[in-house]
Amino acid sequence: MMNNAGSRVSGLGAVTGYGWGREQLWEGLVSGKSAASLQAGFGATANDPGWVVTIPEGGTPSDGPTRFSRAMRAAAREAIEDAMARGWVPGPRVGLVHACVLGDLTMYPMATPGLAGAYTGRQYLGVTPSTPVSLLMTEYGFHGPAMNVSAMCTSGSAAVITAKSWLDAGMVDDVLVVSTDLSATPEVVAMFVQLGVAITDDEALSACRPFQEGSRGFTFGEAAVAMLMTNREHSDGYADVLGGAMRHDAYHVTSVDPELTHVRGCVDDALRAAGVTGDDIRYLNAHGPGTRQCDAAEGEIAKSLLPNAEVYSVKPLAGHCQAAAGAVELAAALLGYERGEIPASPQVAPAVLPQLLDGRTTAVEGLTLKSSLGMGGHNAALVLAPKS
């Protein structure tokens, strides 16, 4: 846990299935239409199409040879430029926390046994997750701590919580948080289909119905999202992170502990760290992947701990972006604070949770709790407040 001094999110950048930029993300979310498309190779066989969210071609070639490197750098640059336009001036110790799970899959063949002679030592550096972090630090001359965090689908939220802990401990003046996941390959998506959680044979809004009848799971997605965080006074920003917490079920490699002891405990810890109670939470920005276990867990948390909170999930719209899932969902909340709207997914079936919002909704000022549940038992929660 960390203390309840708010850390301002001063800049935001995004590359998502909706396009390159945070404005494209916002326009896509409020359209109520999913970023998923029917793409070859993602169906039941290699020749069949399937529904998936991928980042469209784009970016700057000088940012690197792969989609991963270009998206990561583009999101980071947009967040930095956004923060500077809002009055942020970098302190002497700017840190970087990068959330990733599989890293840059394009570089993996370089580490394949038997192919050593085909690649140079410099090319091998591209396989290590620390290399994109180091290159980004070098580009901007940042000299604070820099590291990756990896906690499956909670990674994006865990990165924000880690950044706040650095700020509160006085280790840094500012932190750039980046979450990158461009792992929507037919091979990776097929593994999640085999696990029974990813759906490729139906449109996203039909297959993924968080907290609604008939939900089958999620549509796999890609995203790179960046946020600039600081505890220092400056002119503007999106919202304040009041506090957060992380726990682990230590129960099962895929299943949520049915007792919900540590899911509930994580939310309690986050509320306590933020200096608020469950009664103070106006919105639950849910992990909401549309799977039976996760929806049941978060539905119970909403009913028992957050009695005044309305609930929404953007998974049916942006897709499940694995390492960047928490980050793209936080970005939706941050943009919503700035624009006075909640970009909730539209309901397509009867809700099993009465607090569920139905599509684009005018926001009421108040606190947001962001929850994240990661495969393997990872739990994260954090509390956002409108900028003071």
Image (tube, helix red, strand yellow):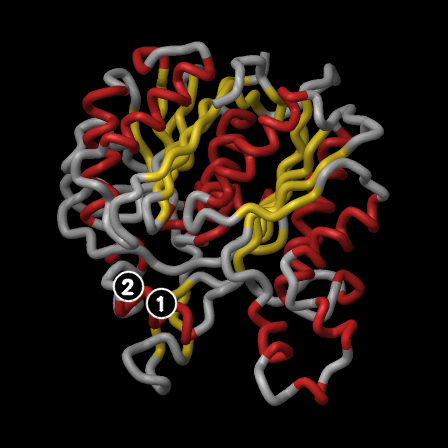
| Image quadrant assignment for residue 126 | bottom right
Residue 8, x across and y down, in percent = 62, 22
Q: Secondary structure at mark 2?
A: loop
Q: Residue at x 72, y 67 (%)?
A: 125
Q: Secondary structure at mark 1?
A: strand
Q: Residue at x 20, y 24 (%)?
A: 303
Query: Does residue 42 sit above or below 241 in this rendering?
Result: below
The dot on residue 295 is none
Quadrant into which the C terminus falls = top right
Nearer to the camera, 76 or 274: 274
Q: Could you tell me how far apart the alpha carbons at marks 2 and 1 are, in whole angstroms?
A: 8 Å
Q: Is residue 24 visible?
A: no
Q: Residue at x 46, y 66 (%)?
A: 184
Mark 2, residue position: 199
Query: Does residue 139 sit above or below 84 in this rendering?
Result: below
Query: Does residue 6 sit above or below 57 in this rendering?
Result: above
The dot on residue 51 is 1
